C-alpha cells in the first residue's frame, strides 16, 4: 500500500488552484508505507482526492503533485509530458535552441531540459525525478534522437532533497563547445561549464529587443557569454562587455569571432567597482545593460538584495547620457515586479535622473509561468529612458 497524505483543514485551496507543492507542515497525517521517492496520493482533510506526486520525507516540500486524474503510471506520464512540452514549443516556432521542459510549469516538477542544437542539457532537482532518470533519458532520446545528453544537476538546492550535486554524460557524446543559433547569431555554448544548464535561454527575446535601444556606446554588465553584447553589436558603434569571470569573457570573444563582430571589447572586473570608476573618470554611455545573477535565493535576503539592486541601478543611471537607455533585469522570483519597479524609482531619485519606462518584459515563452505559482515567474526586464 502506497503513502496516503491527508492535509490539515483549510490547506487544500492552493493545491486545488493548481499549485503542485505540498509542504510538510501542511500535512495532518500520513498513512501507508512505501519507499521514499515513490508515488503517493494526496487528499484533503476530509478525504477528497487532490492528486498524486513523488514524496520525499527529507524535504520541506513533502510532495510535488503532477498527476490530477486517476493515472498510476508515473513513467508514462513523464514521457507524455515531455512530448507535449516539446510540441508546444515547436508550435511557437522554437526549433534550434530552447527550454523544452520548465519544471512545474510543464507539469514535471523539478525537471529542467534545455535543447542546444543537437544536444540536451538536463537538470534534476528532486528525489522522485532522480529515481526516474532512466525514464527521463529514454523519453528524451525517443523524442529528439539527440547526439548527446548532459546532466547539469550541480546546484545547491539538491541538498534540500538529500541529493548530491551531479554532472556527466547521460547519453551519446557531448563536446566542450556546441554552436547554436539565436536571433540570427551563432553562439558558442559550453554545456559542461556554462552557467545553469549552459546558457541563459530565458533572455533570448529580451536580447533581440535590445537592438531597438543599443545605439552609440553600449555597456553590457554581468555579460556572461555575451548574448546582450552580441545583439547590441549589430547596431551599436561600440560595446564593452564586463564580467568578473575570465571564462565568460573567453566565451564572449569566441562568440564575437563567430559572428565577425569587431566592435566588442571585454573587461574583466567587478561591475560595482567599475561603474564607480567610470563615474570618477566622467565616462558615459548611450545604453547600459544590467543582467546580474540573482542577488537573493531566499525570502530572508530580499531586503539586502534590494539594496544591491538599488546601488547598481543608481550607479548605472548616473553614467547614461540624456536620452540614453537602461535595460535592467532581475532573475530572482523573490523580488516581485512591484518591488523591482519601486526600487527603480528610488534609483532614479538617488541618481538625480528623470526616467521614462518604455517596456516591461519577462522570460521568453519557452519558460511559461503558472498563475497559481509565483515561483515560475522570476525574470523581470525593464527598459528605461533617461530624459534628463
Image: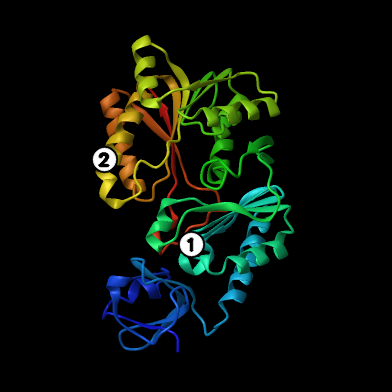
Foreground: disc 2 or disc 1: 1
Residue matched to label 2: 304
Examine the rendered structure and indicate whether residue 40 appears above or below residue 115: below
Residue 158: give x, y in percent of width and height.
43, 57
Secondary structure at numbered mark 1: loop
- Which part of the image, by quadrant, shows the N terminus? bottom left
Q: Nearer the viewer, residue 259 or 269?
A: 269
Q: Residues within 10 Å of mark 1 (few under 14, many from 20)?
A: many
Numbered tag placed on residue 124 in the rendering: none
Give yes or no for contact between labels 2 and 1 (Cβ–Cβ under 8 Å). no
CA distance separating discs 2 and 1: 27 Å
Residue 138: give x, y in percent of width and height.
67, 66
In the displayed structure image, the side of residue 378 where residue 346 appears, left or right: left
Residue matched to label 1: 110
Q: Nearer the viewer, residue 121 or 48?
A: 121
Q: Nearer the viewer, residue 51 or 35?
A: 35
Colour scheme: rainbow
Residue at 65%, 60% in the rendered image: 86
- Which part of the image, by quadrant, shows the C terminus? top left
Residue at 31%, 88% in the rendered image: 46
Q: How many marks?
A: 2
Residue 388, visible in the rendered structure: no
Secondary structure at numbered mark 2: helix
Examine the rendered structure and indicate whether residue 328 appears above or below residue 369: above
Q: Quadrant of residue 262?
A: top right
In the displayed structure image, the side of residue 123 where residue 17 appears, left or right: left
Q: Residues within 10 Å of mark 2 (few under 14, many from 20)?
A: few
Instruction: Name the N-terminal-most of marks 2 and 1.
Output: 1
Examine the rendered structure and indicate whether residue 183 appears above or below residue 64: above
Residue 56, visible in the rendered structure: yes
Residue 222: give x, y in percent of width and height.
46, 31
Amino acid at each position: 500500500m502506497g503513502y496516503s497524505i491527508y492535509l490539515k483543514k483549510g490547506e487544500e485551496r492552493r493545491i486545488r488552484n493548481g499549485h503542485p507543492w505540498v509542504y510538510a507542515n501542511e500535512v495532518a497525517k500520513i498513512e501507508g508505507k512505501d519507499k521514499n521517492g515513490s508515488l503517493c496520493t494526496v487528499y484533503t482533510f476530509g478525504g477528497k482526492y487532490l492528486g498524486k506526486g513523488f514524496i520525499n520525507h527529507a524535504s520541506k516540500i513533502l510532495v510535488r503533485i503532477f498527476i490530477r486524474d486517476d493515472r498510476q503510471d508515473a513513467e508514462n506520464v513523464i514521457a507524455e509530458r515531455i512530448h507535449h512540452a516539446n510540441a508546444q514549443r515547436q508550435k511557437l516556432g522554437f526549433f534550434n535552441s530552447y527550454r523544452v521542459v520548465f519544471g512545474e510549469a510543464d507539469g514535471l516538477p523539478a525537471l529542467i531540459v534545455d535543447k542546444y542544437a543537437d544536444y540536451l542539457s538536463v537538470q534534476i532537482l528532486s528525489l522522485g525525478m532522480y529515481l526516474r532518470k532512466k525514464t527521463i533519458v529514454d523519453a528524451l532520446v525517443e523524442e529528439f534522437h539527440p547526439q548527446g545528453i548532459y546532466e547539469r544537476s550541480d546546484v545547491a538546492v539538491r541538498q534540500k532533497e538529500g541529493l548530491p550535486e551531479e554532472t556527466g554524460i547521460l547519453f551519446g557524446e557531448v563536446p566542450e563547445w556546441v554552436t547554436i543559433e539565436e536571433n540570427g547569431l551563432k553562439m558558442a555554448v559550453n554545456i559542461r561549464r556554462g552557467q545553469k544548464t549552459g546558457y541563459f535561454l530565458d533572455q533570448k527575446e529580451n536580447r533581440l529587443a535590445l537592438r531597438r535601444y543599443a545605439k552609440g556606446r553600449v555597456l553590457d554588465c554581468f555579460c556572461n557569454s555575451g548574448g546582450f553584447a552580441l545583439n547590441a553589436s549589430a547596431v551599436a558603434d561600440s560595446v564593452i562587455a564586463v564580467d568578473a569571470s575570465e571564462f565568460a569573457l573567453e566565451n564572449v570573444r569566441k562568440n564575437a569571432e563567430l559572428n565577425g563582430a569587431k566592435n566588442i571589447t571585454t573587461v574583466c572586473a567587478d561591475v560595482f567597482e567599475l561603474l564607480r570608476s567610470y563615474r570618477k573618470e566622467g565616462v558615459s554611455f548611450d545604453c547600459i545593460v544590467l543582467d546580474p545573477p540573482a542577488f537573493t535565493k531566499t525570502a530572508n535576503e530580499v531586503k539586502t538584495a534590494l539594496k544591491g539592486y538599488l546601488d547598481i541601478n543608481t550607479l548605472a543611471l548616473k553614467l547614461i547620457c540624456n536620452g540614453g537607455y537602461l535595460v535592467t533585469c532581475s532573475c530572482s522570483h523573490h523580488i516581485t515586479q512591484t518591488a523591482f519597479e519601486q526600487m527603480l524609482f528610488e534609483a532614479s531619485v538617488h541618481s538625480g535622473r528623470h526616467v521614462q519606462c518604455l517596456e516591461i518584459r519577462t522570460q521568453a515563452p519557452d519558460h511559461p509561468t503558472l498563475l497559481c505559482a509565483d515561483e515560475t515567474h522570476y525574470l523581470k526586464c525593464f527598459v528605461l529612458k533617461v530624459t534628463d
